Image: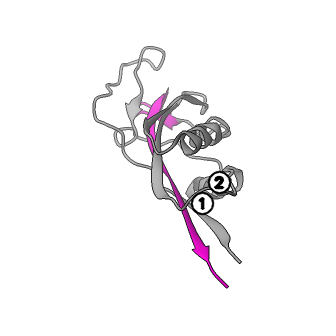
Amino acid sequence: MKVKFLILTFYILCASNSAHMAQKYEECEPISYAEVETKPEFPGGDTALMIFLSENIKFPNNCANVNDKVIVQFIIDTTGTVTNAKIIRELDPYFDAEAMRVVKSLPKWKPGFNKEGTAVPVLYKMPISFKTFNIYD
């Protein structure tokens, strides 16, 4: 019997260093994840984020073997809401759409803060890896 398994992994990568911080959060561009003083946090932390992703990504029953990733970039705004999600590394139209769907369904995070203690928008890049393999009886 052929059984397909999905192993979902993710990594939170540092964003590019091109974002700059303004004095007031209303006026500022998203800050790179690596440059923010207090980083945004998914409710329950990274383990909870991994569980959320693995429980919410739908995997097609008839897909061929795959071992690759989609990279999604998004902003955690000053209220902790995921905004401006976009694919920056494509894999396949199905997997791209599925990664976007799940990222857009993420609940509110604890927002990031600058050195002054002001909530700021933070730019994230998140690879979502898709891997299938077959086990034969």
Instruction: Please report the bounds of the magenta region as a residue range.
Output: 112-137
Q: Mark 2 and mark 1 in contact (Cβ < 8 Å)?
A: yes
CA gap, disc 1 to disc 2? 7 Å
- Image quadrant where residue 34 sits: top left
Would residue 115 be seen by someone viewing this image from the given angle? no
Crowd rating for badge 1 (residues with CA inside 10 Å; few <14, some 14–19, many 20+): few
Task: Name the secondary structure under disc 1.
Answer: helix
Q: Nearer the viewer, residue 24 or 51?
A: 51
Q: Is residue 40 above or below residue 7?
A: above
Q: Nearer the viewer, residue 63 or 40?
A: 63
Query: In the image, which disc is placed on residue 58?
Result: none
- Report the residue at 59% width, 42% height from top: 94
Quadrant containing the N terminus is bottom right
- Report the residue at 56% width, 70% height from top: 133
Crowd rating for badge 2 (residues with CA inside 10 Å; few <14, some 14–19, many 20+): few
Main secondary structure along the magenta-highlighted residues: strand
Return the residue at label 2. Answer: 44
Mark 2 residue type: Gly
Residue at the far bottom in the pictured view = 137
- Report the residue at 36% width, 39% height from top: 15
Where residue 43 appears, as percent x and y from the top left, is 65, 48
Which of the two discs, 1 and 2, sits closer to the camera? Answer: 1
Quadrant containing the C terminus is bottom right
Mark 1 residue type: Thr
Task: Name the secondary structure under disc 2.
Answer: loop
Q: Is residue 62 above or below residue 16?
A: below
Return the residue at label 1. Answer: 47
Where residue 75 appears, as percent x and y from the top left, is 50, 31
Instruction: Give yes or no for residue 25 being in the magenta stretch.
Output: no
Q: Is residue 55 above or below residue 88?
A: below
Would residue 100 be seen by someone viewing this image from the given angle? yes
- Report the residue at 67% width, 53% height from top: 60
